[in-house]
């Protein structure tokens, strides 16, 4: 893709997020399977449902643009998922594994917060204010999910990992 | 590395950050070279100086631990840098390139905020409160840098990219 306008860079950001959410939807079930804590599994299942909705929102944004969502692979999320997978392979204790899962998921959440934040700024600047409003909703949900992961970690996951 | 305690997972997080900061120190000069906006270059040069200090802090934290900082490559940051590099290769307009550089750097900042946040939580939980205080300082600087990048983007970079 030849990018010479802010509009095309915005489209690129959405393609990147389309690929990111698609990769997250494939990786999250493996994280849920690896998690042994009931509350953490519930949070990750909520994350999975939200990611499906976030992907659907991006598809709807593409309907209003003259581009297709595919044709790009998000290497950022690819690296984050590979890293999380490597760490989980090295962790041999279930309680410590739950803490490691949260660590990986918070990196993913932060990627999304940054990327959606940039996409929203571009949408607003090129005058696509309805797009910016949709992206704001997703950003708020990603931020809430990150805080929820911190809450679960601080509530008992890290303590249980300490006393293992 | 065989990880079966929260202490070892904490060491792993620090090794990951050591690798992340080292990779950032190599990649940032290329971003500075690619940036054509004077204010953006100044912010990125400040980022470079801060990253050197952040790496030095991690080295000092390792001096208090029974582990060496090397032996691990952060695949998360590797993916983020590869992605930023790919995007810059596709952008043909200088003003749009400045906006794309900020987009890549904010993904990196968010990675660091997430990873340092997790490391600080682990440090506090295992009773390494001096480490946690050092990590808090870095987290605050990463957050400030992210806000500074947003400020520059909103101040004129995105507008200049729009009117290119």
Image: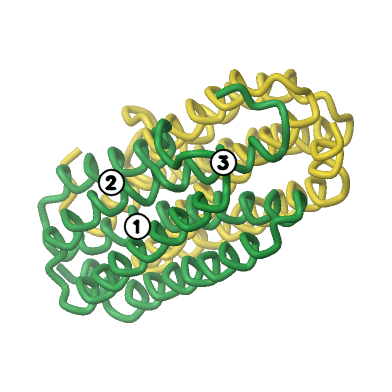
Chain colours: A yellow, B green
Give residue B66's mark: 3
Label 1 Cα crowd, 10 Å radius (few <14 / some 14-19 / many 20+): many
User: Closest to the observer: B136 or A35?
Assistant: B136
Q: In which quarter of the image is the N terminus of chain A?
A: top left
Q: Residue at x 57, y 27 (%)?
A: A87
In front: mark 1 or mark 3?
3
Q: Which residue is drawn at 48% across and 54% down?
A: B112
Q: Label 2 belongs to which residue?
A: B84
Question: Helix or strand or loop: what does disc 2 sit on?
Answer: helix
Q: How far apart are marks 3 and 2 (CA)?
A: 35 Å
A38 over A103 or under it: above or below: above
User: Closest to the observer: B107 or B124?
Assistant: B124
User: Closest to the observer: A78 or B26?
Assistant: B26
Labels 2 and 1 touching (C-beta < 8 A): yes
B34 over A161 or under it: above or below: below
Q: Earlier in the sequence, mark 2 or mark 1?
A: 2
Q: Label 1 belongs to which residue?
A: B105
Q: Which of marks 3 and 2 is nearer the N terminus?
A: 3
């Amino acid at each position: 893709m030849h990018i010479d306008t802010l509009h095309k860079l915005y489209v690129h950001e959405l393609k990147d997020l389309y690929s990111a959410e698609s990769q997250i939807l494939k990786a999250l079930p493996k994280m849920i399977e690896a998690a042994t804590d009931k509350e953490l599994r519930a949070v990750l299942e909520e994350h999975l449902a939200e990611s499906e909705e976030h992907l659907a929102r991006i598809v709807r944004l593409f309907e209003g643009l003259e581009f297709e969502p595919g044709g790009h692979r998000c290497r950022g999320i690819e690296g984050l998922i590979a890293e999380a997978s490597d760490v989980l392979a090295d962790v041999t204790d279930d309680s410590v594994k739950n803490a490691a899962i949260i660590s990986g998921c918070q990196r993913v959440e932060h990627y999304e917060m940054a990327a959606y934040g940039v996409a929203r700024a571009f949408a607003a600047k090129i005058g696509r204010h309805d797009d910016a409003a949709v992206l704001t909703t997703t950003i708020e949900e990603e931020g809430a999910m990150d805080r929820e992961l911190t809450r679960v970690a601080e509530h008992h996951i890290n303590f249980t990992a300490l006393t293992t």
